[in-house]
Image (cartoon, grey):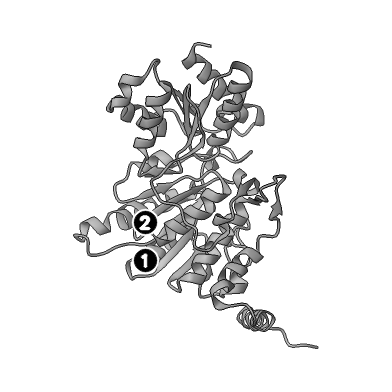
């Protein structure tokens, strides 16, 4: 009977086998190859341009693998990220490739392992800390805000804290009030934090790499439903050198009649509403994907409003003191206000803890018909 190998021995065995099987591959390209190797459902899209599609889960996995490969100071820590390959399989294969020193399972103690990770960051390492959901990060809110976000300022600029907090944010499906809250506005109000909320696979890959490289604490808000969604991705984004700038929004669809601005999966409903507006009313809607909550790309929104003269904000968070509220304030305080032909309309989640019953849950969050009604109201259609 063959002796049972430990997980570390298995890792070493796999690594040696990989080197033997890929001896002819240059060191320059090996990291990119290994990251893309794990994207098992990349397939050609129905396009003559040869575009490819990839799930958000695989885009995140590739981005994490490339940064682990690039910088030995980067490590991943969280509940079930290692042996179980991640609660949502985002860290699939990373333990086998990088070993137990770089991919670390933790006990169920958000306060404890967040404090440990912040301490590692203050010591010069670059932790990527996964919360199974950002709802659980409330257990560690003191570590995130008082320790990670404020130390650089309180030390007079001498003590940086390079840490990335990541995990699913907002509602999924059937997980009720304590697992469904959006924290974009919470973290977006804190000086010292950068807050990202990606929409597409390309967003996820480019922004997770940017977050890990950024010397500041970054809150990276993902979406559980989005993990399995597929998006077209450019050849440029498949490169291990691809990153997206923090603080820059992306125009997903150009238009001239109304601006629809959102983040995370709300962008999907904006795009669908824009398509319906053009098909049924001949209205050309411009869709802005914020990508970054803090810093917020206010200039991009202002320029769009000056062109379209109408604005609808879309988010799944609660209506009071939200991202849309901040955008409204920024527009009121800028030259864009003089270009508005109608009041700004906000589309948000409902003012209620998320219901468990599916029928009520469906009513609690915006969708394409909700965005469409708001746009028609603003345009007096």
Horizontal arrangement in the rendering, residue 232 relative to residue 122 (left or right): right
Q: Residues within 10 Å of mark 1 (few under 14, many from 20)?
A: many
Q: Is mark 2 in CB contact (under 8 Å) with mark 1?
A: yes
Q: Which labelled disc corresponds to residue 121?
A: 1
Where 301 falls versus 66 (above or below)?
A: above
Residue 291 point in image, percent of width and height? 46, 43
Taking the image as shown, residue 346 lies to the left or right of residue 190, namely right
Residue at coordinates 43% horizontally, 62% vertically from top-left? 112
Q: In the picture, residue 340 is in which quadrant?
A: top left
Does residue 79 show up?
no
- Residue 187 falls in image quadrant: top left
The label on residue 259 is none
Q: Secondary structure at mark 1?
A: helix
Question: For the point 58% across and 21% down, which residue is it?
Answer: 277
Residue 154, given in percent of the width and then of the height, sits at 21, 57
Is 4 rendered above or below residue 73? below
Instruction: Please give the residue where the numbered disc 2 appears in the rendered image.
Output: 217
Residue 381 x, y percent position in the rendering = 53, 11
């Amino acid at each position: 009977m063959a002796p049972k190998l430990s997980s570390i021995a298995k890792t070493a065995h796999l690594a040696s086998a990989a080197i033997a099987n890929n001896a002819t591959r240059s060191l320059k390209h090996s990291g990119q190859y290994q990251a893309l190797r794990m994207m098992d459902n990349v397939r050609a899209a129905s396009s003559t341009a040869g575009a490819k599609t990839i799930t958000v889960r695989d885009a995140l996995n590739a981005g994490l693998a490339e940064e682990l490969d690039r910088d030995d100071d980067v490590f991943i820590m969280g509940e079930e990220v290692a042996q179980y390959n991640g609660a949502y399989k985002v860290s699939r294969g990373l333990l086998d490739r990088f070993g137990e020193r770089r991919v670390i399972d933790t006990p169920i103690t958000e306060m404890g392992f967040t404090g440990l990770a912040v301490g590692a960051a203050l010591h010069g390492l670059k932790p990527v800390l996964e919360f199974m959901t950002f709802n659980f990060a409330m257990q560690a809110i003191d570590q995130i805000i008082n320790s990670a976000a404020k130390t650089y300022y309180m030390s007079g600029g001498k003590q940086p804290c390079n840490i990335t907090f990541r995990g699913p944010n907002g509602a999924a499906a059937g997980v009720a009030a304590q697992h469904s809250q959006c924290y974009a506005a919470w973290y977006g109000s804190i000086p010292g934090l950068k807050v990202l909320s990606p929409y597409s696979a390309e967003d996820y890959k480019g922004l997770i790499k940017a977050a890990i490289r950024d010397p500041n604490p970054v809150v990276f808000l993902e979406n559980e439903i989005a993990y399995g969604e597929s998006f077209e991705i450019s050849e440029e984004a498949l490169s291990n050198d691809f990153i997206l700038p923090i603080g820059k929004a992306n125009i997903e669809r150009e238009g001239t009649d109304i601006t629809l601005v959102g983040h995370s999966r709300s962008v999907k409903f904006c795009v669908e509403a824009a398509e319906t507006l053009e098909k049924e009313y001949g209205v050309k809607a411009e869709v802005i994907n914020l990508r970054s909550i803090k810093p917020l790309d206010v200039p991009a929104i202002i320029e769009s409003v000056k062109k379209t003269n109408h604005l609808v904000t879309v988010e799944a968070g609660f209506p009071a003191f939200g991202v849309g509220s901040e955008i409204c304030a920024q527009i009121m305080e800028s030259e864009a206000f003089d270009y508005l032909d109608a009041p700004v309309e906000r589309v948000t989640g409902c003012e209620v803890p998320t219901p468990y019953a599916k029928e009520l849950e469906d009513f609690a969050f915006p969708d394409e018909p909700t965005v469409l009604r708001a746009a028609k109201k603003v345009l007096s259609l």
